[in-house]
Image (spheres, rainbow, N blue to C red):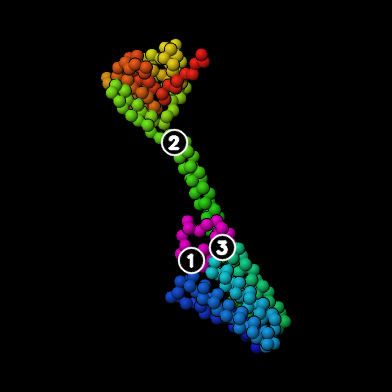
């Protein structure tokens, strides 16, 4: 019976640390590692001198690894570290540590069961080991559940980061400006006629009981003569300073649709007061 007492001596000492309610779990775990390391060093010397069998050193080394795994769980599973601060790598380590501790305990249960079967010790000796086995299995389940949650949170974080990067890469900077006789609103920088024009016409007609006075829809000879590519743009023959013009610019701004508003004719830009819907017309490159 004396060898059996030696085998479980260090285990009892480790439990004594775990029962201290005044110390944080991580501190207790670190102390258990220190104690296990001391046991390895002490038993190594006794094995070398022939006072203990080699198996005792192997058991002490297993206890040390078990204590290290317990320290991992203290940080990631039952410590105070918020889930959002646990990385996916840490989650994998947490599950692996919990599983190794369960496997180690299973070996101890099997060893004790053999002693019971051989009549070396009483059946009651199994009870604390089985209780610990159940606790460690529960920790494995908890670790896997928390790891799954961490993985889901990480996926959401990656998705949000990706969307932010896409938005940053595709968002055009505002380039609003106003000069004498002309106002420019950049908005989203995009006007899609097939999507945006029809709702605008309907809203304008409902508001003013007349059709939207479109003076140029897309490419025209006039714009080509001025050297402008007017495709995908629409000109509306409204003075931006009157009631209809003010309503139209507010409508466009509310929807992020770019426009140029001219209050009078401007050489090389506008032949009369009107609102140009869409981005600025690009210059045509006409071959000689």
Is residue 126 in view?
no
Quarter where residue 213 is shown: top left
Mark seen at residue 94: 3
Q: Secondary structure at mark 2?
A: loop
Where is residue 55? Give x, y as percent.
69, 80
Mark seen at residue 148: none
Q: Secondary structure at mark 1?
A: loop
Return the residue found at the far left: 242
Q: Which residue is mark 2?
A: 171
Q: Name which residue lies at 42% across and 29% down.
A: 189
Marks 1 and 2, how far apart at CA: 42 Å
Magenta highlight on residue 87 = yes
Identify whether 48 is placed above or below 140: below
Q: Name which residue lies at 66% across and 79% down.
A: 57
219 and 248: which is toward the camera? 219
Identify whether 154 is placed above or below 250: below
The reply, left or right, for residue 58 in relation to residue 283 is right
Circle 1 packing at 10 Å, graded few (<14), some (14-19), many (20+), is: some
226 and 65: which is toward the camera? 226
Is residue 261 in view?
yes
Query: Which quadrant does the N terminus fall into?
Result: bottom right
Magenta residues, dominant SS class: helix
Q: Which residue is mark 1?
A: 79
Q: Name which residue lies at 64% across and 68% down.
A: 103
For marks 1 and 3 on the same chain, the one whose residue lies earlier in the sequence: 1
Quarter where residue 260 is shown: top left
Q: Which mark lies nearer to you, 3 or 2? A: 2
């Amino acid at each position: 019976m004396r060898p059996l007492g030696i085998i479980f001596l260090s285990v009892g000492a480790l439990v004594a640390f775990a029962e201290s309610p005044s110390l944080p779990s991580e501190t207790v775990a670190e102390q258990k590692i220190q104690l296990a390391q001391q046991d390895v060093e002490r038993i190594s010397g006794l094995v070398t001198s022939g006072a203990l069998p080699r198996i005792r050193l192997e058991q002490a080394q297993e206890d040390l690894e078990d204590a290290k795994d317990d320290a991992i769980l203290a940080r990631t599973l039952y410590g105070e570290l918020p889930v959002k601060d646990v990385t996916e790598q840490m989650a994998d380590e947490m599950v692996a540590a919990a599983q190794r501790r369960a496997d180690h305990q299973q070996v101890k249960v099997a060893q004790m069961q053999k002693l019971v079967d051989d009549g070396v010790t009483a059946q009651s000796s199994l009870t604390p080991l089985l209780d610990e086995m159940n606790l460690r299995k529960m920790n494995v389940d908890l670790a896997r559940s928390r790891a799954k949650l961490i993985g889901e949170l990480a996926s959401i974080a990656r998705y949000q980061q990706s969307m932010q990067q896409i938005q940053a890469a595709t968002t055009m900077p505002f380039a609003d400006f106003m000069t004498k006789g002309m106002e420019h609103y950049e908005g989203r920088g995009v006007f899609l006629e097939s999507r945006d024009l029809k709702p605008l016409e309907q809203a304008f007609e409902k508001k003013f009981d007349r059709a939207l006075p479109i003076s140029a829809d897309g490419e025209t000879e006039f714009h080509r003569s001025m050297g402008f590519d007017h495709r995908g743009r629409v000109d509306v023959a409204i003075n931006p300073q009157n009631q209809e013009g003010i309503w139209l610019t507010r409508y466009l701004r509310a929807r992020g649709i770019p426009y140029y508003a001219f209050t009078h004719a401007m050489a090389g830009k506008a032949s009369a007061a009107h609102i140009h819907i869409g981005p600025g017309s690009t210059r045509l490159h006409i071959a000689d």
